[in-house]
């Protein structure tokens, strides 16, 4: 069905054509009139009185020679004027048609972005929105310590809304990566949807910033309380770092080096963040003493970000040690449960559409896995989480329902793997790209849906992609280049936004418009 806008175009075009034709006809008629006027009046009696005697000869000469040049002058001028007006009108209409943007005319609109440009825009939007959500979560953890739940509820609500929008954007991008939808126009719209969802996440956080700043009052009376909270958390982390180091040493004695590999270097990074936090807390105290609330708030926010990431790193070590102990205790039960699942499979009581040959091959594989795990248990240090992962995957391939201890083993492994990938992305978010973030978001969805094996695989993939990004970025900035201690790590961790030579403003609660509102420099 033709729209009203489209149906209106021919009528307007025809109306303009009729007006232009009428103007041209009138111009031609005027010109012709001037041309035939002398002929029509040539035989008429001259109504003008007789000229003086001295002009008689000239008049006789004119009558003898026919129509004079003056008789053609006015018609010629009229014709030239008509042609000039017609040409001017044509040029004006052509220029207007090229520049007008109203319906029914041709417009010189900017070219549509290419698919590559749209993809780059969507990737950048995902990274920015994810950074904003993570930073907002960090700052809100400090506000939760000082204020009651009703006071912080609006900001929790805004953060949850932003997380929902970000999760939807990640899901759209993931389907786009997998080639869905197929249609080019639909794929372009999918990218627009990613950017729109990310923009909405940022808008929700930006809208909550004025109220949060009013609650915390970091540039006023709230600064002293916030400093005490950050310093108290700093001192707690300093003690936990020592305890976590002891736990990591014991872990390495009981398990293989591969078991501790996910947290290798974490305590060193935590100490680096704490050194950076020490410097920023001292700077915040000095700025507060001189009455420079703007600079004090910025230095405090940088210190809070460093303390929060040190907490993530230390907690990661503690959690891995605890999960390895839990996994070691669960391995015997998982072996027993796996043997029961294999016995069910041998009887043919399977739920999946496996042929007898496929079932026989998978049962043989599961037997081999269980035998390998038993040998590791008696051979010395081993990786309990890896043993549980292998047991759970061997049983999962039997399609017997995957219940009991093997299912509990798969869930334990998946939770640890998702949490480990989450920690790594958080403390390296300044350099991690969208692929790792999207895989991690999908792993969290799969874990929430109870698909532990799928969540474990996606989390491991996300961790690998994030480590690839970190290796590709390197560490071009060091303290030897004139930076204060820990600045390079703070930039990699996204604590500082890397917009200025000193590392840039600290990242704060908020979206793209407000997250860099604080400054490390003195007030002007």
Image (tube, rainbow, N blue to C red):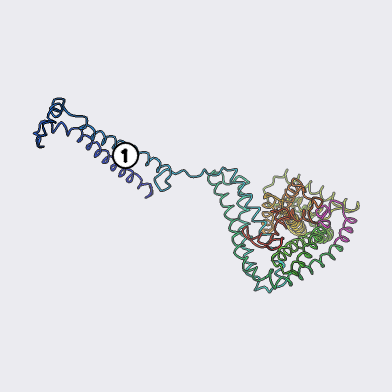
- Given residues 458 and 53, the one toward you in this image is 53
- Residue 410: where, in percent of width, then height? 75, 56
Task: State the image quarter where residue 222 is shown.
Answer: bottom right
- Given residues 151 and 305, the one toward you in this image is 305
- Residue 281: where, in percent of width, then height? 78, 65
- Given residues 267 and 401, the one toward you in this image is 267
Q: Is residue 421 visible?
A: no
Labels in figure, total: 1
- 347 up-or-down from 241: above or below: above
- Given residues 69 and 395, the one toward you in this image is 69
Instruction: Specify the quadrant that holds the C terminus.
Output: bottom right
In the image, farthest residue toward the front: 54
- Horizontal side of residue 47 vs 216, given as left or right: left
Name the residue: 76% across, 63% down. 303
Tell me the residue that label 1 is attached to: 85
- Horizontal side of residue 21 vs 379, given as left or right: left
Task: State the image quarter where residue 487 is shown.
Answer: bottom right
**Predominant SS of the magenta segment:** helix
- For the record, the magenta segment spans 244-269
- Residue 14: where, in percent of width, then height? 31, 43
Look at the numbered disc 1 and give the secondary structure of its residue. Answer: helix
Q: Is residue 253 visible?
A: yes
Q: Within 10 angstroms of label 1, few (less than 14), some, or many (20 or more) residues?
A: some
- Residue 424: where, in percent of width, then height? 75, 55
Magenta stretch contains residue 323? no
- Horizontal side of residue 175 vs 256, given as left or right: left
């Amino acid at each position: 069905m033709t729209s009203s806008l489209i149906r209106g175009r021919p009528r307007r075009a025809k109306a303009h054509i009729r007006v232009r034709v009428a103007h041209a006809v009138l111009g031609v008629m005027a010109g012709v009139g001037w041309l035939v006027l002398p002929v029509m009046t040539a035989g008429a009696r001259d109504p003008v009185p007789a000229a003086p005697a001295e002009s008689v000869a000239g008049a006789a000469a004119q009558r003898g020679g026919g129509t004079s040049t003056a008789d053609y002058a006015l018609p010629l001028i009229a014709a030239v004027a008509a042609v000039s007006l017609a040409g001017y009108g044509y040029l004006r209409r052509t220029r207007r048609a090229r520049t007008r943007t109203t319906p029914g005319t041709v417009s010189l609109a900017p070219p549509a972005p290419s698919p590559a440009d749209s993809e780059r825009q969507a990737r950048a939007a995902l990274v920015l929105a994810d950074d904003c959500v993570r930073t907002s979560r960090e700052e809100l953890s400090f506000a939760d310590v000082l204020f009651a739940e009703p006071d912080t509820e609006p900001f929790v609500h805004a953060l949850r809304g932003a997380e929902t929008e970000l999760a939807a954007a990640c899901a759209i991008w993931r389907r786009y990566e997998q080639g869905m939808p197929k249609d080019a126009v639909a794929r372009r719209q999918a990218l627009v949807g990613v950017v729109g969802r990310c923009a909405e996440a940022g808008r929700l956080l930006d809208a909550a910033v004025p109220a949060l700043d009013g609650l915390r009052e970091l540039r006023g009376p709230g600064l002293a309380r916030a400093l005490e909270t950050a310093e108290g958390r700093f001192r707690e982390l300093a003690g936990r770092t020592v305890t976590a180091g002891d736990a990591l040493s014991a872990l390495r004695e009981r398990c293989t080096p591969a078991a501790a590999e996910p947290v290798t270097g974490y305590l060193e990074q935590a100490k680096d963040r704490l050194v950076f936090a020490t410097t920023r807390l001292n700077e915040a105290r000095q700025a507060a003493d001189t009455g420079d609330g703007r600079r004090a708030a910025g230095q405090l926010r940088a210190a809070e970000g460093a303390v929060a990431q040190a907490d993530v790193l230390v907690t990661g070590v503690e959690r891995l040690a605890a999960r390895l102990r839990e996994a070691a205790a669960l391995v015997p039960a998982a072996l027993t449960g796996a043997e029961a699942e294999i016995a069910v499979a041998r009887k043919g009581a399977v739920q999946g559409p496996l042929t007898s040959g496929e079932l026989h091959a998978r049962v043989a594989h599961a037997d081999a896995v269980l035998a390998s795990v038993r040998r590791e248990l008696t051979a010395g240090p081993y990786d309990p989480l890896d043993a549980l992962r292998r047991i759970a995957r061997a049983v999962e391939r039997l399609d017997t329902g995957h219940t009991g201890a093997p299912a509990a083993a798969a869930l334990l492994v998946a939770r640890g793997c998702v949490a480990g990938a989450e920690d790594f992305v958080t403390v390296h978010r300044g350099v991690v790209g969208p692929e790792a973030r999207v895989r991690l978001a999908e792993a969290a969805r799969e874990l929430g849906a109870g698909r532990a094996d799928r969540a474990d695989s996606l989390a491991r993939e996300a961790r690998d992609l994030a480590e690839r990004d970190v290796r590709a970025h390197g560490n071009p900035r060091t303290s030897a280049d004139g930076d204060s201690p820990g600045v390079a790590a703070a930039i990699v961790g996204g604590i500082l936004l890397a917009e200025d030579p000193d590392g840039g403003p600290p990242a704060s609660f908020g979206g793209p418009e407000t997250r860099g509102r604080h400054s490390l420099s003195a007030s002007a």
